[in-house]
Image (spheres, helix red, strand yellow):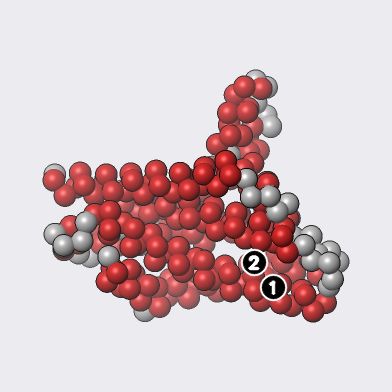
Amino acid sequence: MRAIYKREMLSYFTSPIGYIFMAVFMAMSGIIFSIFTFLSNTTATATYFQLLLYIFIIVIPLLTMKLMSEERKLKTEQILLTSPVSISGIILAKFFAAFTMFAITFLASEVLHFAVLDKFAENINYAEVLGNIVGILLIGAAFIAIGLFISALTESQIIAAISTIAAILILICISMLANYIPNDFIAGTVRWFAILSRFTPFTVGIFDLASIVYYISLSVIFLFLSVRVYEKRRWS
């Protein structure tokens, strides 16, 4: 598992994908942060972090589109499936590699942003900032697990990327959809599954246990589905 993890991490820096991901993420997050803090003359960060989720529609597929589909395209899938590492170990190694890349880039950008903001502003609510950061990391993990699952279904990286974009877009937009549903029960059910609705407590520094469990469960479910896809492929 460790060898696969190291190989995946190395692959992000021996191909353009890792550099493109870091450049796009840091550039877009920097622009949004500047607009909604410095130019808005405020230290409130809730809007910035909420808008940051929309960047995921573009950047998360960059990390996940090659995770499994590249193995099929390069015909190295059978080598993995016959290796001494379990399928769950393979899936987890690839997931943690993508999440590590995401987390390092995200945390580095936030350290840079708030180091600058701290020099020019006072009364920054760091409890709120920490809540947002934890929420973003949990959502990022869930989206990466979804992208990995989609990548396991196809050998085309383009199809994997487009499908992941669509899946993340739908999950983000579910909250908006609930506002147009006249039935309160159905609307409430939709909000229960909505990524943005569950992120709201984190934006004010509240670590909502139900939301944490929801995001972790979403990650686990799609990792499990990825394992099942490859277990079926191993024996087919």
Residue 232 at x, y percent in the picture: 20, 44
Q: Residue at x 69, y 69 (%)?
A: 31
Are the two marked residues, 1 and 2, in contact with CB atoms closer than 8 angstroms? yes
What is the number of the mark on residue 142? none
Q: Quadrant of residue 81?
A: bottom left
Q: Residues within 10 Å of mark 1 (few under 14, many from 20)?
A: some
Q: Quadrant of the C terminus?
A: top left
What residue sits right under mark 1 in the picture?
113
Q: Nearer the viewer, residue 65 or 102?
A: 102
Q: Residue at x 79, y 79 (%)?
A: 119
Q: Quadrant of the N terminus?
A: bottom left
Residue type pointed to by label 1: His
- Residue 13 lies, with reference to residue 2, above or below; the image says below
Q: Is residue 23 visible?
A: yes
Residue type pointed to by label 2: Ser
What is the number of the mark on residue 29? 2
